[in-house]
Image (cartoon, rainbow, N blue to C red):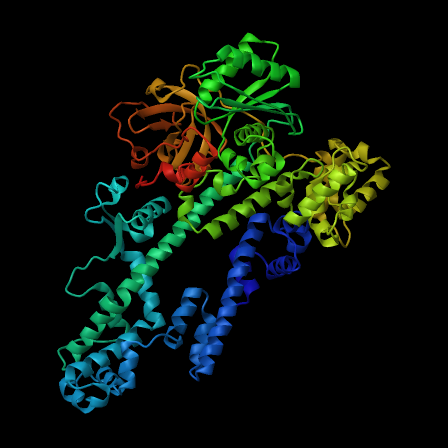
């Protein structure tokens, strides 16, 4: 059997030495971001996605290896480990295959077959299986045993049947063939539980639904499983049967080379096969394959969530300008918070421009005064209830006071209430009302989405499909890796970063992050990276892992503001010495840097990949990989769904992408759906080939369903729209994504029920 490293190398299409080097680095405590960025020579240039796969597979294969040793030991202790079985166990490449091989030897509760063996019926079972010419009724007379309550031929033959059923059902090769056949051929059928039609109406598309199990997309799988979990649907596997014998029974018959030709024992052996399938294996296979389908769907749903989260975290920052955050509300008022260019809170207020107080002019005066006093350059408006009304309020203010040059932007407020009620927010703003904390978050997430959103549990940001239906541990683990990769890709200003942001930096734990902030508060801003070694409990290993990702602006050494790792400073010093120029004369000097040959500066520690990275970084030190900041301009006069008309062309922002299309915020408190078929004129298998969360796009309104709050859009602007145009099933099932009037309790409740996620948008999404 190939080694773990070789298996992973084959999967990555990499060399064994590359994988071995990466495994050693991981085992020594290095993180994926550090290895991907600063150990390219050692790993042969494995990137972060390859390293994430390597890390995941390494864990799985090591668990597999541990389980293999346990199984070998257990069977050996039973004295049943043959050379053939040992070879099969060593060749097993999945946990499922391994457990199949172990099944006959696994300690278990006494079955009817084991009881029959204890009663001395095994020779009878073996005899009838080996020679069907024997008459069961005749042979069974020799095995009646009053001591074991085997008093008649029926009881004895049933016992022998149970012995063979156990044997057949524990045959690893048969189980593998059955799984393979059913995955290729079976249909997954969903049916409504009788009497639950009205209560489970939201699952009505699955009241009598079936499709090939191997082709069920993830969103439909999770929808049906949710229907089952909530007690409205029953799921089962169906196999088309053309003759008198079930296809799986025929497969069992062929596997054991049985032939039913009317011999005395054939009818009895046929009943063994029949019972093996119906009693032993059918439910087991159904459970396993639906479980496999669930695992596949969960993996895909988590992938979609992770991809959207990455796009959201890597959204363009508006920049470090004084920013006003507005958390819209009707009766409770619009919460106002102003933060300075560093994100520090400098002012709060609550205005009541809407019903019932209608203090419109007073609200304008207060907002203008705050903008003028604090030199506000950006106004960040949450996109919840009353967002368009608040947007119009700010527009009125800007029109009335042209001296105010602030730019207004509508941003997603998903998760703002979760942050507001968190321990972190309470520690940061102990005297501030919970509702005003949300306004602070809305302001900061416009300045720097990544720095603010890391304070919120990724699951509460609401960019996933069926996020509460998937493995929460796996979801959290995957989302954490996304956040870690994004934070380290951008880099962190160590003198302004919060504890949550620092915690995501390579090599830093929550304790070390807190120690950095405590040291910063006690001793002032860090002047150079090596001062980090003075932080309590931050030793050489942690420093090695984190230093390259931490930035120090305007410090003693200009390189500390770049992604050049301190360990590579000697390379820069070598370049400086050769060119006889100071660092300042090197940084940003594109023409000079492009004239240098990386090979001239390599040594035993740093090869061409690292030197190339260093030269690129010196050209644009501390460059931000995030895109340029852009915003959507919502159409004036289109503020509610009732304002929409087919054929309207609008600008909007992609809020999320699923497997079946993209949701777009067009400023009417209800996201519209662009089905995958309407994204472009060419065929696409994944909507992310065309759009991603945060993209600004132009869309045409196809259909507006006010009673059900559903909007169908197209990005194919040349499409003709007719009122009778049929819509894909997903469009028919679209539900409201926008939150109700927010409070922390409301948003928590929405989070728990998936209403803040794309899961709610397609509770019952059907096939395209």
User: Residue 680: x percent and y percent?
Assistant: 40, 31
User: Residue 712: x percent and y percent?
Assistant: 34, 28
Q: Is residue 445 above or below residue 154?
A: above
User: Residue 405: x percent and y percent?
Assistant: 60, 14
Q: Is residue 455 above or below residue 211?
A: above
In the shown orientation, is residue 766 left or right of residue 668?
Answer: left
Q: Nearer the viewer, residue 100 or 398?
A: 398
In the shown orientation, is residue 529 left or right of residue 335?
Answer: right
Specify whether residue 508 is in view.
no
Q: Nearer the viewer, residue 133 or 739?
A: 739
Q: How many marks?
A: 0
User: Residue 530: x percent and y percent?
Assistant: 78, 45
Q: Is residue 627 above or below residue 667?
A: below
Say which residue appears at 59% left-offset and 34% top-offset: 626
Quadrant of the rendered image containing residue 237: bottom left
Say which residue appears at 61% left-offset and 42% top-offset: 500
In the shown orientation, is residue 123 left or right of residue 685?
Answer: left
Q: Nearer the viewer, residue 584 or 417?
A: 417
Say which residue appears at 33% left-offset and 62% top-offset: 179
Specify whether residue 284 is in view.
yes
| Residue farthest toward the bottom in the current orientation of the protein | 142
Quadrant of the rendered image containing residue 148: bottom left
In the shown orientation, is residue 675 left or right of residue 112?
Answer: right
* Image quadrant where one finds the C terminus: top left
């Amino acid at each position: 059997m190939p080694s773990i490293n070789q298996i992973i190398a084959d999967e990555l299409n990499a060399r064994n030495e590359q994988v071995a080097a990466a495994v050693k680095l991981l085992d020594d405590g290095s993180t994926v971001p550090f290895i991907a960025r600063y150990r390219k020579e050692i790993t042969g240039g494995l990137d972060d996605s390859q390293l994430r796969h390597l890390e995941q597979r390494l864990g799985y294969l090591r668990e597999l290896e541990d389980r293999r040793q346990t199984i070998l030991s257990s069977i050996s202790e039973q004295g049943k480990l043959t050379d053939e079985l040992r070879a099969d166990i060593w060749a097993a490449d999945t946990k499922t295959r391994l457990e199949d091989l172990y099944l006959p030897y696994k300690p278990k509760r006494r079955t009817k077959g084991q009881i029959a063996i204890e009663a001395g019926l095994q020779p009878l079972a073996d005899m009838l299986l080996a020679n069907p010419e024997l008459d069961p009724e005749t042979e069974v007379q020799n095995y009646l045993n009053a001591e074991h309550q085997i008093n008649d031929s029926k009881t004895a033959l049933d016992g022998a049947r149970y012995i063979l059923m156990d044997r057949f059902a524990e045959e690893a090769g048969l189980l593998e063939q059955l799984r393979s056949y059913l995955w290729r051929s079976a249909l997954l059928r969903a049916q409504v539980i009788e009497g639950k039609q009205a209560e489970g109406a939201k699952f009505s598309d699955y009241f009598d639904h079936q499709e090939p199990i191997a082709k069920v997309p993830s969103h439909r799988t999770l929808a049906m499983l949710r229907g089952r979990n909530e007690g409205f649907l029953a799921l089962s596997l169906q196999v088309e049967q053309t003759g008198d014998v079930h296809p799986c029974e025929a497969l069992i018959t062929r596997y054991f080379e049985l032939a039913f030709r009317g011999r005395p024992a054939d009818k009895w052996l046929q009943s063994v096969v029949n019972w093996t399938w119906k009693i032993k294996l059918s439910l087991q296979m159904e459970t396993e394959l639906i479980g496999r389908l669930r695992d596949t769907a969960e993996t895909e749903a988590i992938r979609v969530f992770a991809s959207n989260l990455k796009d959201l975290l890597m959204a363009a920052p508006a920049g470090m300008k004084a920013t006003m955050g507005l958390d819209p509300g009707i009766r409770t008022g619009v919460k106002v918070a102003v933060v300075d260019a560093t994100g520090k809170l400098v002012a709060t207020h609550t205005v009541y421009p809407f019903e019932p107080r209608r203090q419109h002019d007073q609200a304008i005066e207060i907002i203008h005064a705050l903008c003028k006093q604090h030199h506000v350059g950006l106004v960040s408006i949450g996109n919840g209830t009353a967002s368009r009304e608040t947007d119009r309020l700010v527009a009125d203010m800007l029109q009335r006071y042209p001296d105010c040059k602030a730019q207004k932007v509508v941003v997603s407020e998903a998760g703002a209430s979760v942050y507001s009620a968190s321990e972190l927010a309470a520690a940061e703003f102990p005297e501030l009302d919970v509702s005003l904390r949300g306004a602070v978050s809305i302001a900061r997430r416009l300045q720097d989405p990544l720095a603010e959103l890391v304070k919120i549990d990724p699951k509460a940001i609401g960019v996933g499909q069926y996020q509460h239906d998937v493995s929460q541990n796996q979801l959290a683990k995957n989302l954490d890796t996304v956040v870690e990769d994004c934070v380290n890709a951008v880099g962190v200003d160590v003198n302004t970063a919060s504890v949550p942001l620092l915690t995501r930096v390579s090599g830093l734990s929550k304790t070390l992050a807190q120690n950095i902030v405590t040291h910063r508060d006690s001793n002032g801003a860090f002047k150079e990276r090596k001062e980090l070694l003075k932080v309590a409990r931050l030793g050489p290993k942690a420093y090695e892992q984190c230093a390259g990702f931490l930035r120090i602006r305007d410090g003693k050494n200009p390189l500390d503001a770049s992604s050049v790792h301190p360990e590579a400073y000697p390379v820069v010093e070598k370049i400086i010495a050769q060119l006889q120029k100071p660092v300042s004369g090197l940084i940003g000097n594109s023409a000079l840097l492009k004239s240098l040959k990386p090979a001239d500066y390599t040594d035993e520690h740093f090869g061409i990949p690292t030197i190339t990275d260093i030269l690129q970084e010196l050209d644009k030190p501390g460059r931000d990989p995030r895109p340029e900041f852009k915003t959507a301009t919502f159409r004036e006069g289109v503020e509610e769904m009732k304002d929409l008309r087919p054929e309207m062309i609008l600008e909007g922002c992609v809020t999320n992408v699923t497997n079946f299309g993209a949701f777009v915020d067009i400023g009417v408190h209800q996201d519209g759906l662009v089905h995958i078929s309407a994204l472009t004129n060419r065929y696409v298998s994944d909507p992310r080939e065309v759009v991603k969360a945060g993209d600004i796009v132009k869309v045409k309104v196809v259909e507006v369903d006010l009673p059900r709050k559903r909007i169908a859009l197209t990005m194919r602007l040349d499409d003709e729209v007719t009122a009778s145009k049929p819509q894909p099933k997903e469009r028919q099932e679209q539900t409201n994504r926008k939150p109700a009037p927010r409070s922390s309790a409301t948003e928590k409740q929405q989070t728990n029920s998936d209403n803040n996620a794309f899961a709610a948008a397609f509770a019952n999404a059907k096939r395209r």
